[in-house]
Amino acid sequence: MSITPGGLSSGPRLRYVAPHPYYKHSLLRGWHATNFRRGNSMAKNQNPDRSTGFLLRDNSRFMKAAFNERVSGLTQAQWGALAHLSRHQGLNQVGLADLLEVQPITVARLIDKLVSLGVVERRADPNDRRAQQLFLTDKAQPLLDQMWEAGDEILDEAYAGFSDEERTQFVDMLVRMRSNLARLAQGGARSRLAFRKAG
């Protein structure tokens, strides 16, 4: 038996041809192919269009694409850095790296670019002469205004047909899901640390 975009057909082998675009990702393709070869009934019956993981990834991809159409001139990482610094003026590079979930060396190069554009400046930390704090300049404000305006427009389009109550419930659910996943990630980090210590 084989599985093709046209459906099931008789045959001696089980083969999976994925129609969904995200199966192009090697890890996802490998995971699903492995589960199909093992005869995993849950994986075989899963519809990517109703899968929470795929839906979250799809929505994130579409929102990024819509944002890039409306706002240009900076990379996603640079926009993210400006957004975080607008909320945490005086943050150092290590703190910004934690928020962006990247290595400090990556943030250093990112900030170098933003400093060269005149939208971020480094100042000496009064409490630590070895450290520097990051601040937005007046030149950053028009970019932030453009970014927030584009974000509001995209969300209004994304929530088309939603009632105010549905929007509130949806956001509440996402907040709860994020909290659950954060605990899961923290638990995994603790397990890896304990394993390394035991080894």
Image (cartoon, grey):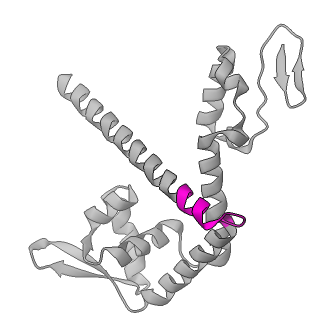
| Magenta-highlighted residues | 158-170
Residue 15 image position (x, y, % from top left): 78, 20
In the rendered structure, the answer to whether residue 108 lies left or right of residue 193 reads right
The correct choice, above or below, for 54 with respect to 28 in the image is below
Identify the residue at horizontal 83%, vertical 7% (top origin).
Answer: 12
Name the image quarter holding the C terminus: top left
Instruction: Say left or right for 112 vs 41.
Output: left
The quadrant holding residue 88 is bottom left
- The prevailing secondary structure element of the residues shown in magenta is helix
Q: Nearer the viewer, residue 32 or 159?
A: 159
The number of discs equals 0
Q: Please name the residue shown 68% across and 14% down the image.
A: 39
Q: Residue furthest top?
A: 12
Q: Position of residue 16 (x, y in %)?
A: 76, 24
Residue at (87% x, 20% y) in the render: 8
- Residue 192 vs 74, above or below: the answer is above
Residue drawn at x 23%, y 76% is 133
Nearer-the-camera pick, 159 or 129: 159
Q: In this rendering, would 115 be left or right of 16?
A: left
